[in-house]
Amino acid sequence: MKITHIGISLATVLTIVFSAAGCTSEQSDREFSNGPEASALDSGSDVENGESHIVHSFDYARGDTPENIVTTDSSSREFVATLLNNTVWWSDGHTEKVVPGSSDAVTLGVAQDVEGRLYVAVRSKDESVAGVWRRAADGAWTRYAAAAPDAGLNGITFGNDGTLFAADSVNGKILSVSPGQPSFNIWLDDPTLEPTSSADPIAASGVNGLKVFDNHLYASNTAQRTLLRIPLSERGSSSPEVLVSGHAIDDFAIDSSGAFYLAVHPDNAVIRVDATGEHTALGTSADGLDGPTAIAITQSGVLTTNLGLLGTEHHPAIVFLESEVTTRAHP
């Protein structure tokens, strides 16, 4: 199956992702060739075959760098990943451009509503593009909610009442939009959500991943190396509670037991933290991890996206890691 090349360069992607934060990337001025086509889903590879393995490899030279992931069926064998270059990739190998005609759209967080529709966070300097886009049943993408062009949209998630939450990693805020509203508003502005510096991409990324579970909104702050818990009914009454510290978490997932699965980007690690606080390493660079950014829970483990961007290996991929899991609470 062919992976269609989308014409936004990796240099442009890096500029949009990092320039808003005031930092630069050493790769941002590189020249990237079109290179060979990225392979389709690895021949003969079962997503869950009982062992940790690379499910699919992307072509770094083409700018095909997966940033977020969500499973789209109950068997967890079908899943969708956003690539930074204005692209959504399906596990059957086909791709779609989210914002037709855009020269700078960068696609990050992905979520699914109760009706199965996909939503993707889009960063852009174009005020007619920046925001969250939704895919209709006929495959057409339209903007669901607008965001400011300087917003560093990242992880997105739905509340039980249909409210869509979005992390603004650059400005250190959580945004929200209610059904039927045209644009995002600030839901929470707190020092625990802020980045720490503009000197490098990790320090420049504040609140990053978001998930709703058990009447709380959970949020990771990559720069401050924390996982936070915020009561949905009492936001602003006190600072978010720090549940986990010491890991530069990008995005994460939660299973129904309350265990967290953390994508620790700079450490090339995925860590499980159970309800008692016990930490278990599920995968490292030895398992093929290269800048893990997001997690999706499957029936016998987790899928993680390798951004493959900030390190030296440059191996963008989707990796399956075997793990004991309970029913997923949130993808």
Image (spheres, rainbow, N blue to C red):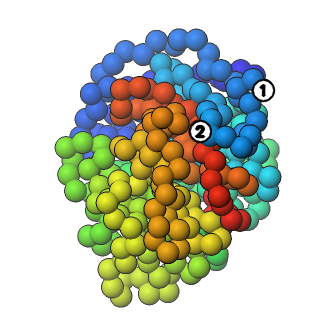
**Where 206 falls versus 161 (above or below)?**
above
* Residue at 32% in and 25% down: 27
User: Where, quadrant-wise, is the C terminus in this rendering?
Assistant: bottom right
Q: Which residue corresponds to mark 1?
A: 44
Residue at image position (27%, 49%) is: 204
Q: Classify residue 234 as left or right of residue 320.
A: left
In the image, taking residue 16 as reference, residue 41 lies left or right, namely right
- For the point 75% across and 23% down, the residue is 43
Element at label 1: loop
- Provide residue 92's location: percent of width, then percent of height: 76, 34
Three-letter code for the amino acid on which mark 1 is drawn: Gly
138 relative to 206, above or below: above
Q: Position of residue 252 (x, y in %)?
A: 51, 57
User: Is 60 located above or below residue 177 in the figure?
Assistant: above
Say whether disc 1 or disc 2 marks the residue closer to the N-terminus.
Answer: 1
Q: Which residue is at a point 53% across and 68% down the rendered structure image? A: 274
Measured in 3D between alpha carbons, the distance from the residue under mark 1 to the one under mark 2, in whole angstroms, is 15 Å
Residue 243 image offset from top left, x and y in percent: 40, 72
In-front residue for pair 137/77: 77
Residue 320 locus on image (x, y percent): 63, 42
- Please count the marks in the image: 2
Asked if one can make out residue 120 in the rendered structure from this viewpoint, the answer is no
- Based on the displayed image, in which of its 4 quarters is residue 125 positioned? top left
Horizontal side of 25 relative to 303 (left or right) equals left
- Nearest the viewer among 41 and 107 is 41
Q: Is residue 31 visible?
A: yes
Q: Which residue is mark 2?
A: 319
Q: Residues within 10 Å of mark 2 (few under 14, many from 20)?
A: many
**Tag on residue 110?**
none
Secondary structure beneath dot 2 equals strand
Crowd class of label 1 (few under 14; some 14 to 19; many from 20; radius 10 Å):
few
**Image quadrant where one finds the N terminus:** top right
